[in-house]
Image (cartoon, grey):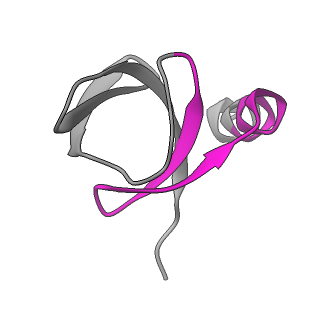
């Protein structure tokens, strides 16, 4: 089973999307989903799967960050 995690979109150009997850930067290939910097997306195996509402993404990140 794989888990899709919420990443914040930092920047986007023609072929690459720069993402942030708790300070870790990651670059993925172009997505067919319309996204812009500041949006939150679910990423699974290096692929943007879905755009998620900011409130939902923050709730998930809060749960993940609890130890």
State the image coordinates of residue 53 (x, y, percent, origin top left): 76, 36
State the image coordinates of residue 24 (x, y, percent, origin top left): 32, 24
Question: Position of 13 compared to 52: left or right?
Answer: left
Please, is residue 36 above or below residue 60 in the view? above
Q: Which residues are magenta?
A: 38-60
For residue 53: magenta? yes
State the image coordinates of residue 49 (x, y, percent, origin top left): 49, 60
12 or 4, which lies in front?
12
State the image coordinates of residue 11 (x, y, percent, origin top left): 33, 17
- Quadrant where the C terminus sits is top right
13 or 45, which lies in front?
13
Question: Position of 24 compared to 28: left or right?
Answer: right
Which residue sits at x=27%, y=24%?
A: 25
Query: What is the residue that sits farthest to the bottom in this orientation?
Result: 1
State how many labels appear. Answer: 0
34 or 22, which lies in front?
34
Which residue sits at x=45%, y=25%?
A: 9
Query: What is the residue that sits farthest to the left in this orientation?
Result: 15
8 or 34, which lies in front?
34
Question: Position of 14 compared to 52: left or right?
Answer: left
Which residue sits at x=83%, y=29%?
A: 55
Which residue sits at x=16%, y=39%?
A: 15
Please, is residue 3 above or below residue 58 in the view? below
Please, is residue 22 above or below residue 16 in the view? above
């Amino acid at each position: 089973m794989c888990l899709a995690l919420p990443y914040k979109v930092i920047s986007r150009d023609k072929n690459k999307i720069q993402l942030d997850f708790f300070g870790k930067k990651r670059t993925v290939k172009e997505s067919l989903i319309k996204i812009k910097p500041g949006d939150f997306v679910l990423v699974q195996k290096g692929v943007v799967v879905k755009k998620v509402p900011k409130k939902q993404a923050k709730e998930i990140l809060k749960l993940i960050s609890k130890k």
